[in-house]
Amino acid sequence: MDAQALSISGFTPFTTIDYPGKLSAVVFCRGCLWKCPYCHNADLQAFGNGEILWESVFAFLQKRAGLLSAVVFSGGEPTAQATLPAAMREAKALGYAIGLHSAGMIPERFSQALELADWVGFDIKAPFGNAYDFIAGKAGASEAALSSLKQLLASNKPYQLRTTVDPALLSKDDIETINRQLAELGAPPTLQQSLNALA
Ligand code: SF4
């Protein structure tokens, strides 16, 4: 797949908060298979042509190589696009560390992106089970996310697990259940992100 085909609808040239400990640029990829009610990037859910060309992102990255140290692929859901690994490879070839923000909704694609990622921010939506599918608005979401999470845990790559807490959707008990499920998988507790803080 050609990196030029990556559909991009947002680009942050400089941030300190999207990849722990690194100055990074963030590429916001268009399209997501899920419909979380609190989605902070709802305008990126629809698939289609993005407004920003990979070519221009790549030209920026070429100029900033050595000044910025990481490129984060976010969304939307970056792994929803088959061309993501090609873009990750091109950024990596410039010497950047590669960050990936993903909810792991397509395990086969997540696997390909995980191989190229140096750090992953992984969203946990709810306790695994029916509640997960409900929040994601998609049957099978729980199974897919769990499969991707197991790949991440087995990869030995650095990662952060995080959960957006909408009090209308997740209770304190739900968070405890998530953390119990994570502990059973050998994973650390999820980092709670308040919905208000993301608004
Ligand atoms: S997975 Fe992320 S991008 Fe997709 S609907 Fe949920 S919050 Fe929005």
Image (cartoon, rainbow, N blue to C red):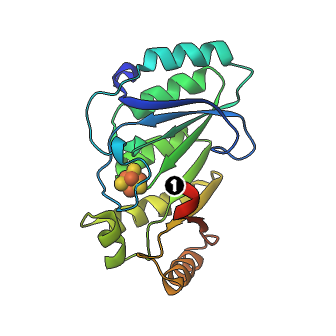
Q: Depth check: 31 or 196 in front?
A: 196
Q: What residue is shown at x 52% (from left), y 17% (from top)?
A: 58
The residue nearer to you, when weighing 145 against 174, is 174
37 up-or-down from 25: above or below: below
User: Which quadrant: the N terminus?
Assistant: top left
Question: What kind of residue is marked 1?
Answer: Ala
Q: Where is residue 113 in the image (x, y as percent from the top left)?
A: 47, 41
Query: Residue 137 appears at what percent x and percent y?
Result: 27, 64
Across the whole image, how many numbered discs are drawn on residues? 1
Q: What element carries label 1?
A: loop
Q: Is residue 80 left or right of residue 101?
A: left
Which residue is rendered at x = 61% and y = 14% of the image?
A: 62
**Residue bearing mark 1:** 199
The location of residue 164, given as percent across then percent down, is 51, 64
Quadrant in the picture for residue 86: top left
Q: Which residue is drawn at 58% across and 41% down?
A: 99
> Does residue 47 appear anywhere in the picture?
yes
Q: Position of residue 172 (x, y in %)?
A: 54, 84
